[in-house]
Image (cartoon, rainbow, N blue to C red):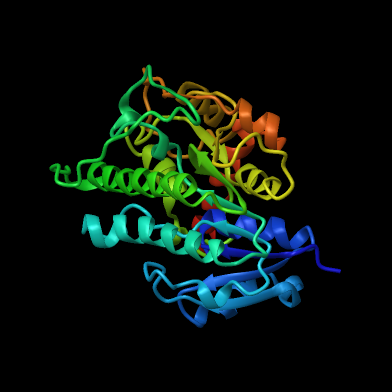
Amino acid sequence: MSKGLILITGASGFIGSHVLDRVLKAGYNVRLTIRKEAQIHELKQLFPAHTQQMDFAVVPDITALDAFGKAMDGVDYIFHLASPMPMKGEDLQRDYVDPAVKGTDAILKAALETPSVKRVTIMASILSIMPMGGMAMQDLVIKENSNEPNPVDLNMEFPSGLDGHGLKYQASKILAHQATLQFIQQQKPHFTLTTLHPTFVLGPSLVQKSAEELSGVNMMFMRSLMFKKPLFPVAIVDVRDVADVMFATIDAKLERNGEECIISGKETSWDDIVAFMGRKYPKASNSLEPPFERAFKANAEKAEKLLGAKWKPMEEMIGSVLDQQLAFEKASKV
């Protein structure tokens, strides 16, 4: 007997596929929103033992305010993960802000109009609760539910390259989160809403099929090994732990509506990672050289307390990325 129906957006992505895996194994039925019909076959192939639990709703444009209306029938829970990713476009408004903000508005509007919905969990980002450019602030301490404003100037001059994409992405995450908080304040919904704020998410991919398909933070990690200094601060969390935490929001006893939970693994450093690689992967390419800058502070005690979060060690997380990528590279040479 099914335990309930969960609507999941973004299930074909890196984090979303792990969330879907966790939910299916727990016995829930799911309705997956997809942009195109071809994704139905891809997701069924990914989880062949669970096809009877999977239903699909084609939503080609999540920015439409009524985008999710037809997908909401009988839904008990919503996991919203669909959001633009860095490097997927150049236009700030079209490629970043609109999909993030309007997509959030649309899913919350649909949930508000669906009495059966009990809980909504949004996969936000650590970037959505820190100041613009805060990643470079070594002494920054990030706090949940602080109500501190993080202003975004959409008319600012964004730098080119990876830094510019990162700032555009952060702007979209801040604005989407502000839209969520405004929704709670104005609408006072009948359901419980939680936002999760993971740091940099790494780990084994369920959707990557070749070495060339490396993406996201896994790609940033592997590229960091090509330089003397890394491309991001080492505030990291395993994707499998992120999926477990999102799943836990279904039954968690939360202290308020609009609970913000930081999701971040055990504190580590690039020095620790370099030392681990020297021991376990001595032949792997690695150009990183100390000293390394410290990361900002992201305390995940609330997630541990309210959601039972547990964190895989750095060695398992980094090892899973290296093992998978090295296996893909080896297979491509056969």
Seen at 14% across and 46% down, the residue is 155
Residue shown at the point (54%, 61%) measured from the top left: 112
Task: Decide: is 283 above or below 244.
Answer: above
Q: Residue at x 68, y 63 (%)?
A: 76
> Residue 233: where, in percent of width, then height?
40, 30
How many labels, in total?
Answer: 0
Q: Hey, which quadrant is residue 120 in on the image?
A: bottom right
Q: Nearer the viewer, residue 181 or 318?
A: 181
From where the camera sits, is residue 188 visible?
yes
Residue 212 lies in quadrant: bottom left
Residue 182 as seen in the image, left or right of residue 10: left
Query: On the rendered structure, is 51 left or right of 12?
Result: right
Residue 296 occupies quadrant? top left
Q: Nearer the viewer, residue 113 or 100?
A: 113
Residue 229: percent from left, percent from top: 33, 29
Residue 327 visible from this viewpoint: no
Q: Is residue 236 above or below residue 188?
A: above
Residue 32: where, in percent of width, then height? 59, 70
Q: Position of residue 131 (x, y in %)?
A: 32, 31
Q: Which residue is pictured at 67% across the width and 56% down the height?
A: 118
Q: Is residue 126 left or right of residue 229?
A: right
Say if 48 sits above or below 79 in the image.
below
Q: Residue furthest bottom?
A: 37
The N terminus - image quarter: bottom right
Which residue, as the protein is rendered here, is positioned at the far right?
1
